[in-house]
Amino acid sequence: MKTNRLITALAMAGASSAALAAPPIEFSGYFRAGVGVNTAGGNQVCFGLANADTKYRLGNECDYVIEPTFDAKLAEYEGSAWHVRVMPSVYKAWDAGSAQNASNGPDALTTRFGQIYAYGQNISQLANGRVWAGRRFYNRLQTGINDQFLENNDGNGAGVEDMDLGIGKLSIAFMMDPNNDAYNNRASLPIRMTGIKTVPNGELSIYVTPSKQLKTEDQTGVNPPPADQPKGIAVGVYQKLSGTILGGDTLFGVKGDKFGDLKNTRVVFQQGANFGATAVDFITEYRIRKNTGNTGNKWFTIGARADTHLSGPFRFLAELGHDQVKPDGGGAKQNLTKGTLAVAASAGKEAGSRPTVRLFVTHAIWNDAVRTAGAGGLSSTNARQVFGDKKSGTSVGVQAESWW
């Protein structure tokens, strides 16, 4: 009996010590999933232009995404904290059906580790910044209703981040594409300065990203020598304001990027505001793409979303967006207008309350230049398959979304 009691006591002590020693873990993430049909028959389809840089999101996302994120604090040293962050993810585009995944069937999912990296933060020798290495989402500057990444340098890399220099916070990283071959990759050196005080309630951010190819010949002789790629450079300047216009948040940005003969120049403006129970988000953008042989185009977009609390968990949402693409060389202008009406049940009164479940109807109309352009018209394969001979289309569905 004494031996059994001793063993039991030791086991309980060991379990207690293990529990005390376990690192604190923060759990966060994002997901969306749903179901829908199109009025011609079959699955929901989504509407956008192939040569536009974005599409308007509400009732217009034909995919499943889940990105659970685990962040463990493992150590502290001289006031700094040291973490490991891991984000497995699952993704499936509705366009990736049985035709694209014949061997796996239409239920095939793309799984990966979207992020897995270690970092130390609040390091006094780095001006209270952080050091990191691994695979991560990096430099993501995102708009809302059209889900555009004005800046994005996701990949494998390492760097120092958010070093407080007084006038702003400096970040420098070395990034590479995790999906390229060992003998042919591309490296970038994203540099950003954020938090530059310019006007009351305003901050300026500057992003500079040079890039170049890293390559050699495949010494096994299996693959031909990689084709040469030009150097690249991108520069973006963004001014944010808080509470200045309509009491909401404002983003004004200009960006230019060059990749060989291909040049893009864009101006973007986004404004959020609240009018009682209604939250409004407005965005407009103009982009000029220049390339050799009159193969560029000009793209203009304008759109807005209104999100109104009704009663209890229920909300009403309306979104309208218009895209126009004018090809160089005198081709016909392509126009597409997409509108969505939705009712939602959400876990709160605010527009950003999550989880939320939305019942929506989405209708899009486009001109004859889109209809006759084939793959250069509607961006979605499913939309072309169902509505390719028409100039309008409709989807009805239910979508759940949450972040935490």
Image (cartoon, rainbow, N blue to C red):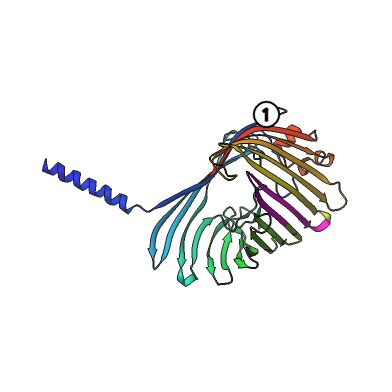
Q: Nearer the viewer, residue 187 or 127?
A: 127
Residue 203 lies, in percent from the top left, at: 62, 64
**Nearer to us in this view, 290 or 160:** 160
Q: Residue furthest left?
A: 2
Q: Is residue 15 above or below residue 98?
A: below
Q: Is residue 283 above or below residue 126?
A: above
Task: Name the secondary structure under disc 1.
Answer: loop
Q: Name which residue type carries label 1.
A: Gly
Q: Which residue is mark 1?
A: 42
**Residue 277: x, y in percent?**
62, 43
Q: Whole-percent x and y of residue 152?
A: 62, 56
Quadrant of the frame with the N terminus: top left
Please report the residue visible at 11 percent of the width from the left and 43 percent of the height from the top. 2
Depth check: give the residue in front, 282 or 314.
314
Residue 119 in the image: x percent, y percent? 47, 61
Residue at the image point whose x is 39% and y is 68% from the top: 78
User: For the magenta stretch, what is the residue range?
Assistant: 268-293
Residue at figure coordinates x 84%, y 42% from the top left: 369
Decide whether the magenta segment is chiefly helix, strand or loop. strand
Q: Is residue 74 visible?
A: yes
Image mark count:
1
Q: Quadrant of residue 102?
A: top right
Q: Is residue 111 visible?
A: no
